[in-house]
Amino acid sequence: MKYLFGFILIFTFLSCEKVIDIPLNEADRVIVVEAILKDQPGVSFVKLSKTASVYEETTFPRVSGAEVVVTDDNGGQFVFLESTPLSGIYTHSTFVVEENTTYSLKVVSENEEVTAVSSTRSKPDIDSLTYSLEVFGFGGEEFETYLMEYHSQENGNETNHYRLKIWVNEKEVEIYYLGDDQFINGQYYEAQFFGTSPDLGDSVRIEMLEMDEVMYRYYIGLSNELDASPFSAAPSNPPTNLVGNALGYFGVFMTDTASVVIQ
């Protein structure tokens, strides 16, 4: 069965270029946590910063010297250490996320503690990534384009939520897709994705990330803010799994990748 928009009938598109200004005064400064843990060694990180003053034009200041610890429900404990050249970035060289595991995050900085919990399910399964040359007419002229399509087996034993990331010639496409398994649970499916225009000789790579529902709702909330009209009400912060005086998220992801060269 083919789904033109992938996992569900409507995808959420996020642009990386739009910036949301949150008016904060000096007393409102809080820690910002961006924690992404994956099932590959050396790629997980926790980025800590603080909200900037409304009068400042600089980026968010990084938070150094924090205590960052990740634990799992199997009794494992992993201390993430601050990177020497990159202040505010905390990593662990051998940590990997495992399937069907619950992880807890604890961040302690300046006598403030922030905690969060996130869980994994099974690893997503991309069978293949394919393309087809399509010719269409417009204004009396013919145009060619390559349509990209991935093929995947969905796990029918659980409820899954996904994000799809795309690179063309190793440059990340500035939109991404979110979807759940409402219409594809347990099925082998094919899905086209748009927003890319690869040419002959280009390489295309995709990454599918499986996440829990809380993280999925965070991305949905973020997309609603990014897509907000300038005439709509001021956006509120998207729902978060962080507990404490903090903004941001803690996400653990099972992943799969596929790539192809247009020939």
Image (cartoon, rainbow, N blue to C red):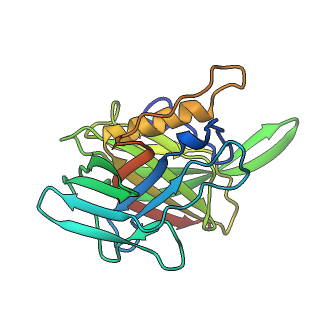
Which residue is outermost to the right?
Answer: 140
- Examine the rendered structure and indicate whether residue 101 appears above or below residue 228: below
User: Quarter of the image containing the N terminus?
Assistant: top left
Q: Quadrant of the C terminus?
A: bottom right
Q: Quadrant of residue 76?
A: bottom left
Query: On screen, 86 above or below 51?
Result: below
Give the image quarter of residue 34: bottom left
- Rendered position, 42 above or below 240: below
Q: Nearer the viewer, residue 252 or 19?
A: 19
- Horizontal side of residue 176 vs 116, given as left or right: right
Query: Farthest residue in the bottom direction?
Result: 84
From the top left corner, tell me how far across and down residue 132 is, in percent.
Answer: 59, 53
Left or right, 154 with reference to 101: right
Residue 151: image x %, image y %? 41, 51
List x then y, in percent, for residue 194: 60, 44
In this view of the protein, which residue sits in the foreground, 2 or 61? 61
Q: Residue at x 61, y 38 (%)?
A: 24
Q: Is residue 11 visible?
A: no
Which residue shows up at 53% across the image and 29% down it?
Answer: 236
Picture quadrant of residue 157:
top left
Residue at image point 51% right, 43% down: 177
Image position of 156 (left or right of 211): left
Q: Residue at x 42, y 59 (%)?
A: 128
